[in-house]
Amino acid sequence: MSGAPAGLVLRGRATGVELAGRSAVVTVAVPEGVLRWDGASVRTRVGDEVHVVVDPGRLHLFDPATGVALWHPE
C-alpha cells in the first residue's frame, strides 16, 4: 500500500486518555496486552478503536507488574 506507515500496526481500544497539550497519552488494550501511546491525537476518546503504528526504534518496554524498564532504544 503506497503511503502506508512503516512498522508493526497494533489494533486495539482506547481505555484511557490523558491530554498533554497538543497531543494525548492513550492507554490502549490490544490482544497482546496493554500499551501506552504517547503522541496520540487529542481527539481520541475512551472506547475509540485505534490503530497504533509501532516504530521499533522508539519503543520502550516495561514490566507490567513492577514498572521496571526492560528495553529502550539506545
Image (cartoon, helix red, strand yellow):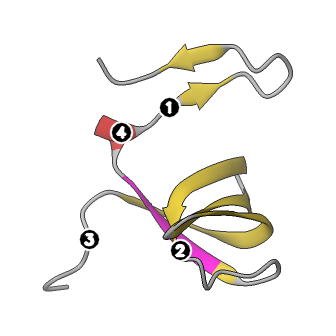
User: CA gap, disc 4 to disc 2?
Assistant: 17 Å
| Disc 1 secondary structure class | loop
Q: Which residue occupies 34% across, 49% down?
A: 55
- Density class for disc 1 (Cα within 10 Å; few <14, some 14-19, many ≥20) is few
**Tag 3 and tag 2, C-beta contact below 8 Å:** no
Q: How would you rate the neighbour count of disc 3 (Cα within 10 Å): few for under 14, some for 14-19, many for 20 or more? A: few
Give, as a three-letter code, the residue at label 3.
Pro
Label 3 – label 4 distance at C-alpha: 14 Å
Q: SS for tag 2?
A: strand
Q: Position of residue 28 (x, y in %)?
A: 71, 61
Among the two numbered marks 3 and 4 on one chain, the one whose residue lies closer to the N terminus: 3
For image coordinates 29% across by 37% down, the residue present is 57
Q: Which residues are magenta?
A: 50-54
- Does residue 16 belong to the magenta stretch? no
> In the picture provided, is 3 more to the left or to the right than 7?
left
Q: Which mark is residue 51?
A: 2
| Mark carried by residue 5 | 3
Residue highlighted by disc 4: 58
Mark 1 and mark 2 lie on one chain; the one further toward the N terminus is 2
Task: Specify the amino acid type for callout 4.
Answer: Arg
Between marks 1 and 3 in the image, the one whose residue lies nearer the viewer = 1
> x and y percent of residue 14 in the render?
75, 71
The CA span between labels 3 and 2 is: 11 Å
> In the shown orientation, is residue 59 left or right of residue 56?
right
Q: Earlier in the sequence, mark 4 or mark 2?
A: 2
Circles 1, 3 touching at the beta carbon (< 8 Å) = no
Number of on-image labels: 4
Q: Is residue 51 magenta?
A: yes
Q: Amino acid at mark 2?
A: His
Residue at the disc numbered 1: 60
- Label 4 CA crowd tier, 10 Å (few <14, some 14–19, many 20+): few
Q: Main secondary structure of the magenta part?
A: strand
